[in-house]
């Protein structure tokens, strides 16, 4: 085997290892949201209290985004990732040992810090290991596996239930498995010096359109997760049908990200991002008519998941095209910041639009958000 073939094989092995590890944590992330909500609801807490408690996790994402470059400079990226993986498992077990809403406020905050660190470092390594000619497909594979992991979380909850310590032990065990997968990769992962200049604040002016794309996607994601079932119920659909719309949205994300990455490798990341933004606007405007047209709602929601989440795949891919080393780490940390901020506003703005304009205010405010992104992409710039 030639030296070049060995290098390629090693890179693919590392890529698959990092993607496998982070997908394991995606399962735990997908498990935590419904599990904790069900436990709190069973304890008699109000929906508003449950929502405020859940908001501690994106708040942790926001805070972590400023800390990750500094922490990586002090302890190294691999040690930081393994430590965050172990911390995630310990926090998940702590949920089960102290099932109290007041204890869960700091626990969810630190869970946001730990998981954000894992996702930021994983995205940085995957982008560093990918090459310019296949980065779109690699990032499409990454986001596909990530979405599949998130979707498996609720399915796992059905199997283990939400009562007692068992689901928390399962979650902690899955985290331990993820740490074990990550542990032996350390010496072979990309290494680079991280200076004090590599920070979220210094990165923000370098890629404002990418930053905007991530914030809008996070807004869309959280608004859809929180309110798409409510939207369906408000229009007279059954609870089961409304819940299945979320499944269709997730399926669109899972099925189409690799094909979108393949197209982006051929025609350019920014063109596909603009196309996804414009398609999302059109699909959001079509949704009010589709929900009254029977089966038409399913392909509309499926394509909405593909296009809406596609802008994140394109943002990650372009980030890897344009930046390397410490700026790539700072860029991924900036993405985490915008994910936290967009997530904090998704539910309140989506719900407010429904209060002001009726149920169709939800797809309306989503259309406005993606229209803004499309106009910025159309104008060009960084």
Image (cartoon, rainbow, N blue to C red):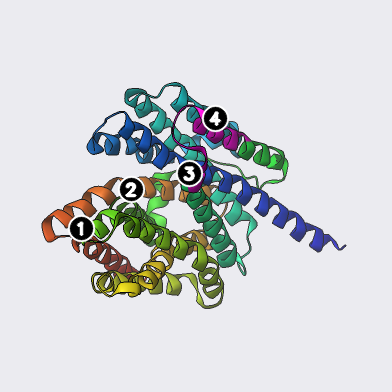
Residue 25 higher or lower than 173, as above or below: below
Precedes in sequence: disc 1 or disc 4 = 4
Q: Identify the mark at residue 21; answer none if there is no mark.
A: none
Q: Identify the mark at residue 158; answer none if there is no mark.
A: 3
Crowdedness of circle 2 by 10 Å Cα count: few (<14), some, many (20+)? many
For disc 2, the marked residue is 343
Precedes in sequence: disc 2 or disc 4 = 4
Precedes in sequence: disc 2 or disc 3 = 3
Residue 171 higher or lower than 298, as above or below: above
Q: How many circles with numbers are drawn on the protein?
A: 4
Left or right placement of residue 77 versus residue 210 in this view: right
Crowdedness of circle 4 by 10 Å Cα count: few (<14), some, many (20+)? some
| Magenta residues, start to end | 155-176
Residue 359 higher or lower than 62, as above or below: below
Taking depth in this image into account, of 283 and 138 the one nearest to the observer is 283
Quadrant location, the C terminus: bottom left
Precedes in sequence: disc 1 or disc 2 = 1
Between marks 1 and 3, how big is the CA–CA gap?
A: 26 Å
User: Residue 195, percent across and down?
Assistant: 53, 40
Label 4: element kind: helix
For disc 4, the marked residue is 169
Residue 120 visible within the image: no
Tell which tag, 1 or 2, sits nearer the viewer: 1
Q: Are marks 1 and 4 in contact (CB under 8 Å)?
A: no
User: Would you say residue 107 sits in the magenta stretch?
Assistant: no
Precedes in sequence: disc 1 or disc 3 = 3
């Amino acid at each position: 085997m030639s030296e070049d073939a060995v290098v390629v094989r090693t890179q693919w092995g590392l890529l698959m290892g990092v993607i496998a590890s982070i997908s394991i944590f995606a399962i735990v992330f997908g498990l935590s949201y419904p599990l904790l909500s069900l436990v709190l609801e069973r304890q008699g807490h109000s929906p508003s209290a449950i929502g405020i408690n859940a908001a501690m996790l994106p708040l942790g994402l926001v805070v972590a985004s400023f800390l990750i470059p500094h922490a990586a400079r002090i302890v190294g990226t691999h040690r930081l990732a393994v430590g965050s993986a172990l911390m995630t498992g310990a926090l998940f077990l702590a949920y089960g040992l102290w099932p109290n809403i007041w204890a869960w406020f700091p626990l969810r905050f630190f869970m946001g810090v730990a998981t954000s660190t894992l996702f930021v470092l994983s995205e940085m390594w995957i982008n560093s290991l990918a090459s310019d000619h296949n980065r779109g497909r690699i990032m499409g594979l990454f986001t596909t596996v990530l979405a599949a992991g998130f979707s498996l979380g609720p399915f796992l909850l059905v199997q283990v239930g939400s009562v007692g310590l068992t689901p928390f032990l399962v979650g902690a065990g899955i985290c331990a498995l993820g740490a074990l997968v990550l542990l032996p990769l350390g010496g072979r992962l990309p290494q680079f010096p991280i200076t004090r200049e590599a920070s979220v604040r210094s990165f923000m002016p370098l890629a404002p359109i990418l930053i905007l794309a991530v914030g809008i996607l996070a807004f869309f994601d959280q608004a859809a997760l929180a309110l798409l079932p409510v939207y369906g119920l408000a229009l007279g659909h059954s609870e089961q049908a409304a819940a299945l719309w979320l499944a269709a949205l997730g399926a669109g994300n899972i099925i189409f990200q690799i094909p979108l990455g393949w197209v982006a490798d051929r025609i350019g990341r920014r063109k596909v991002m603009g196309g996804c933004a414009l398609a999302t606007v059109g699909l959001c405007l079509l949704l009010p008519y589709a929900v009254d047209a029977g089966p038409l709602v399913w392909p509309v929601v499926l394509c909405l998941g593909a296009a809406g989440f596609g802008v994140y795949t394109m943002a990650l891919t372009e980030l890897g095209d344009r930046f390397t080393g410490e700026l790539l780490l700072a860029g991924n940390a900036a993405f985490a910041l915008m994910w936290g901020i967009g997530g904090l506003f998704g539910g309140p703005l989506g719900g407010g639009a429904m209060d002001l304009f009726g149920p169709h205010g939800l797809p309306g405010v989503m259309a406005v958000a993606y229209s803004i992104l499309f106009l910025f992409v159309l104008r060009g710039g960084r």
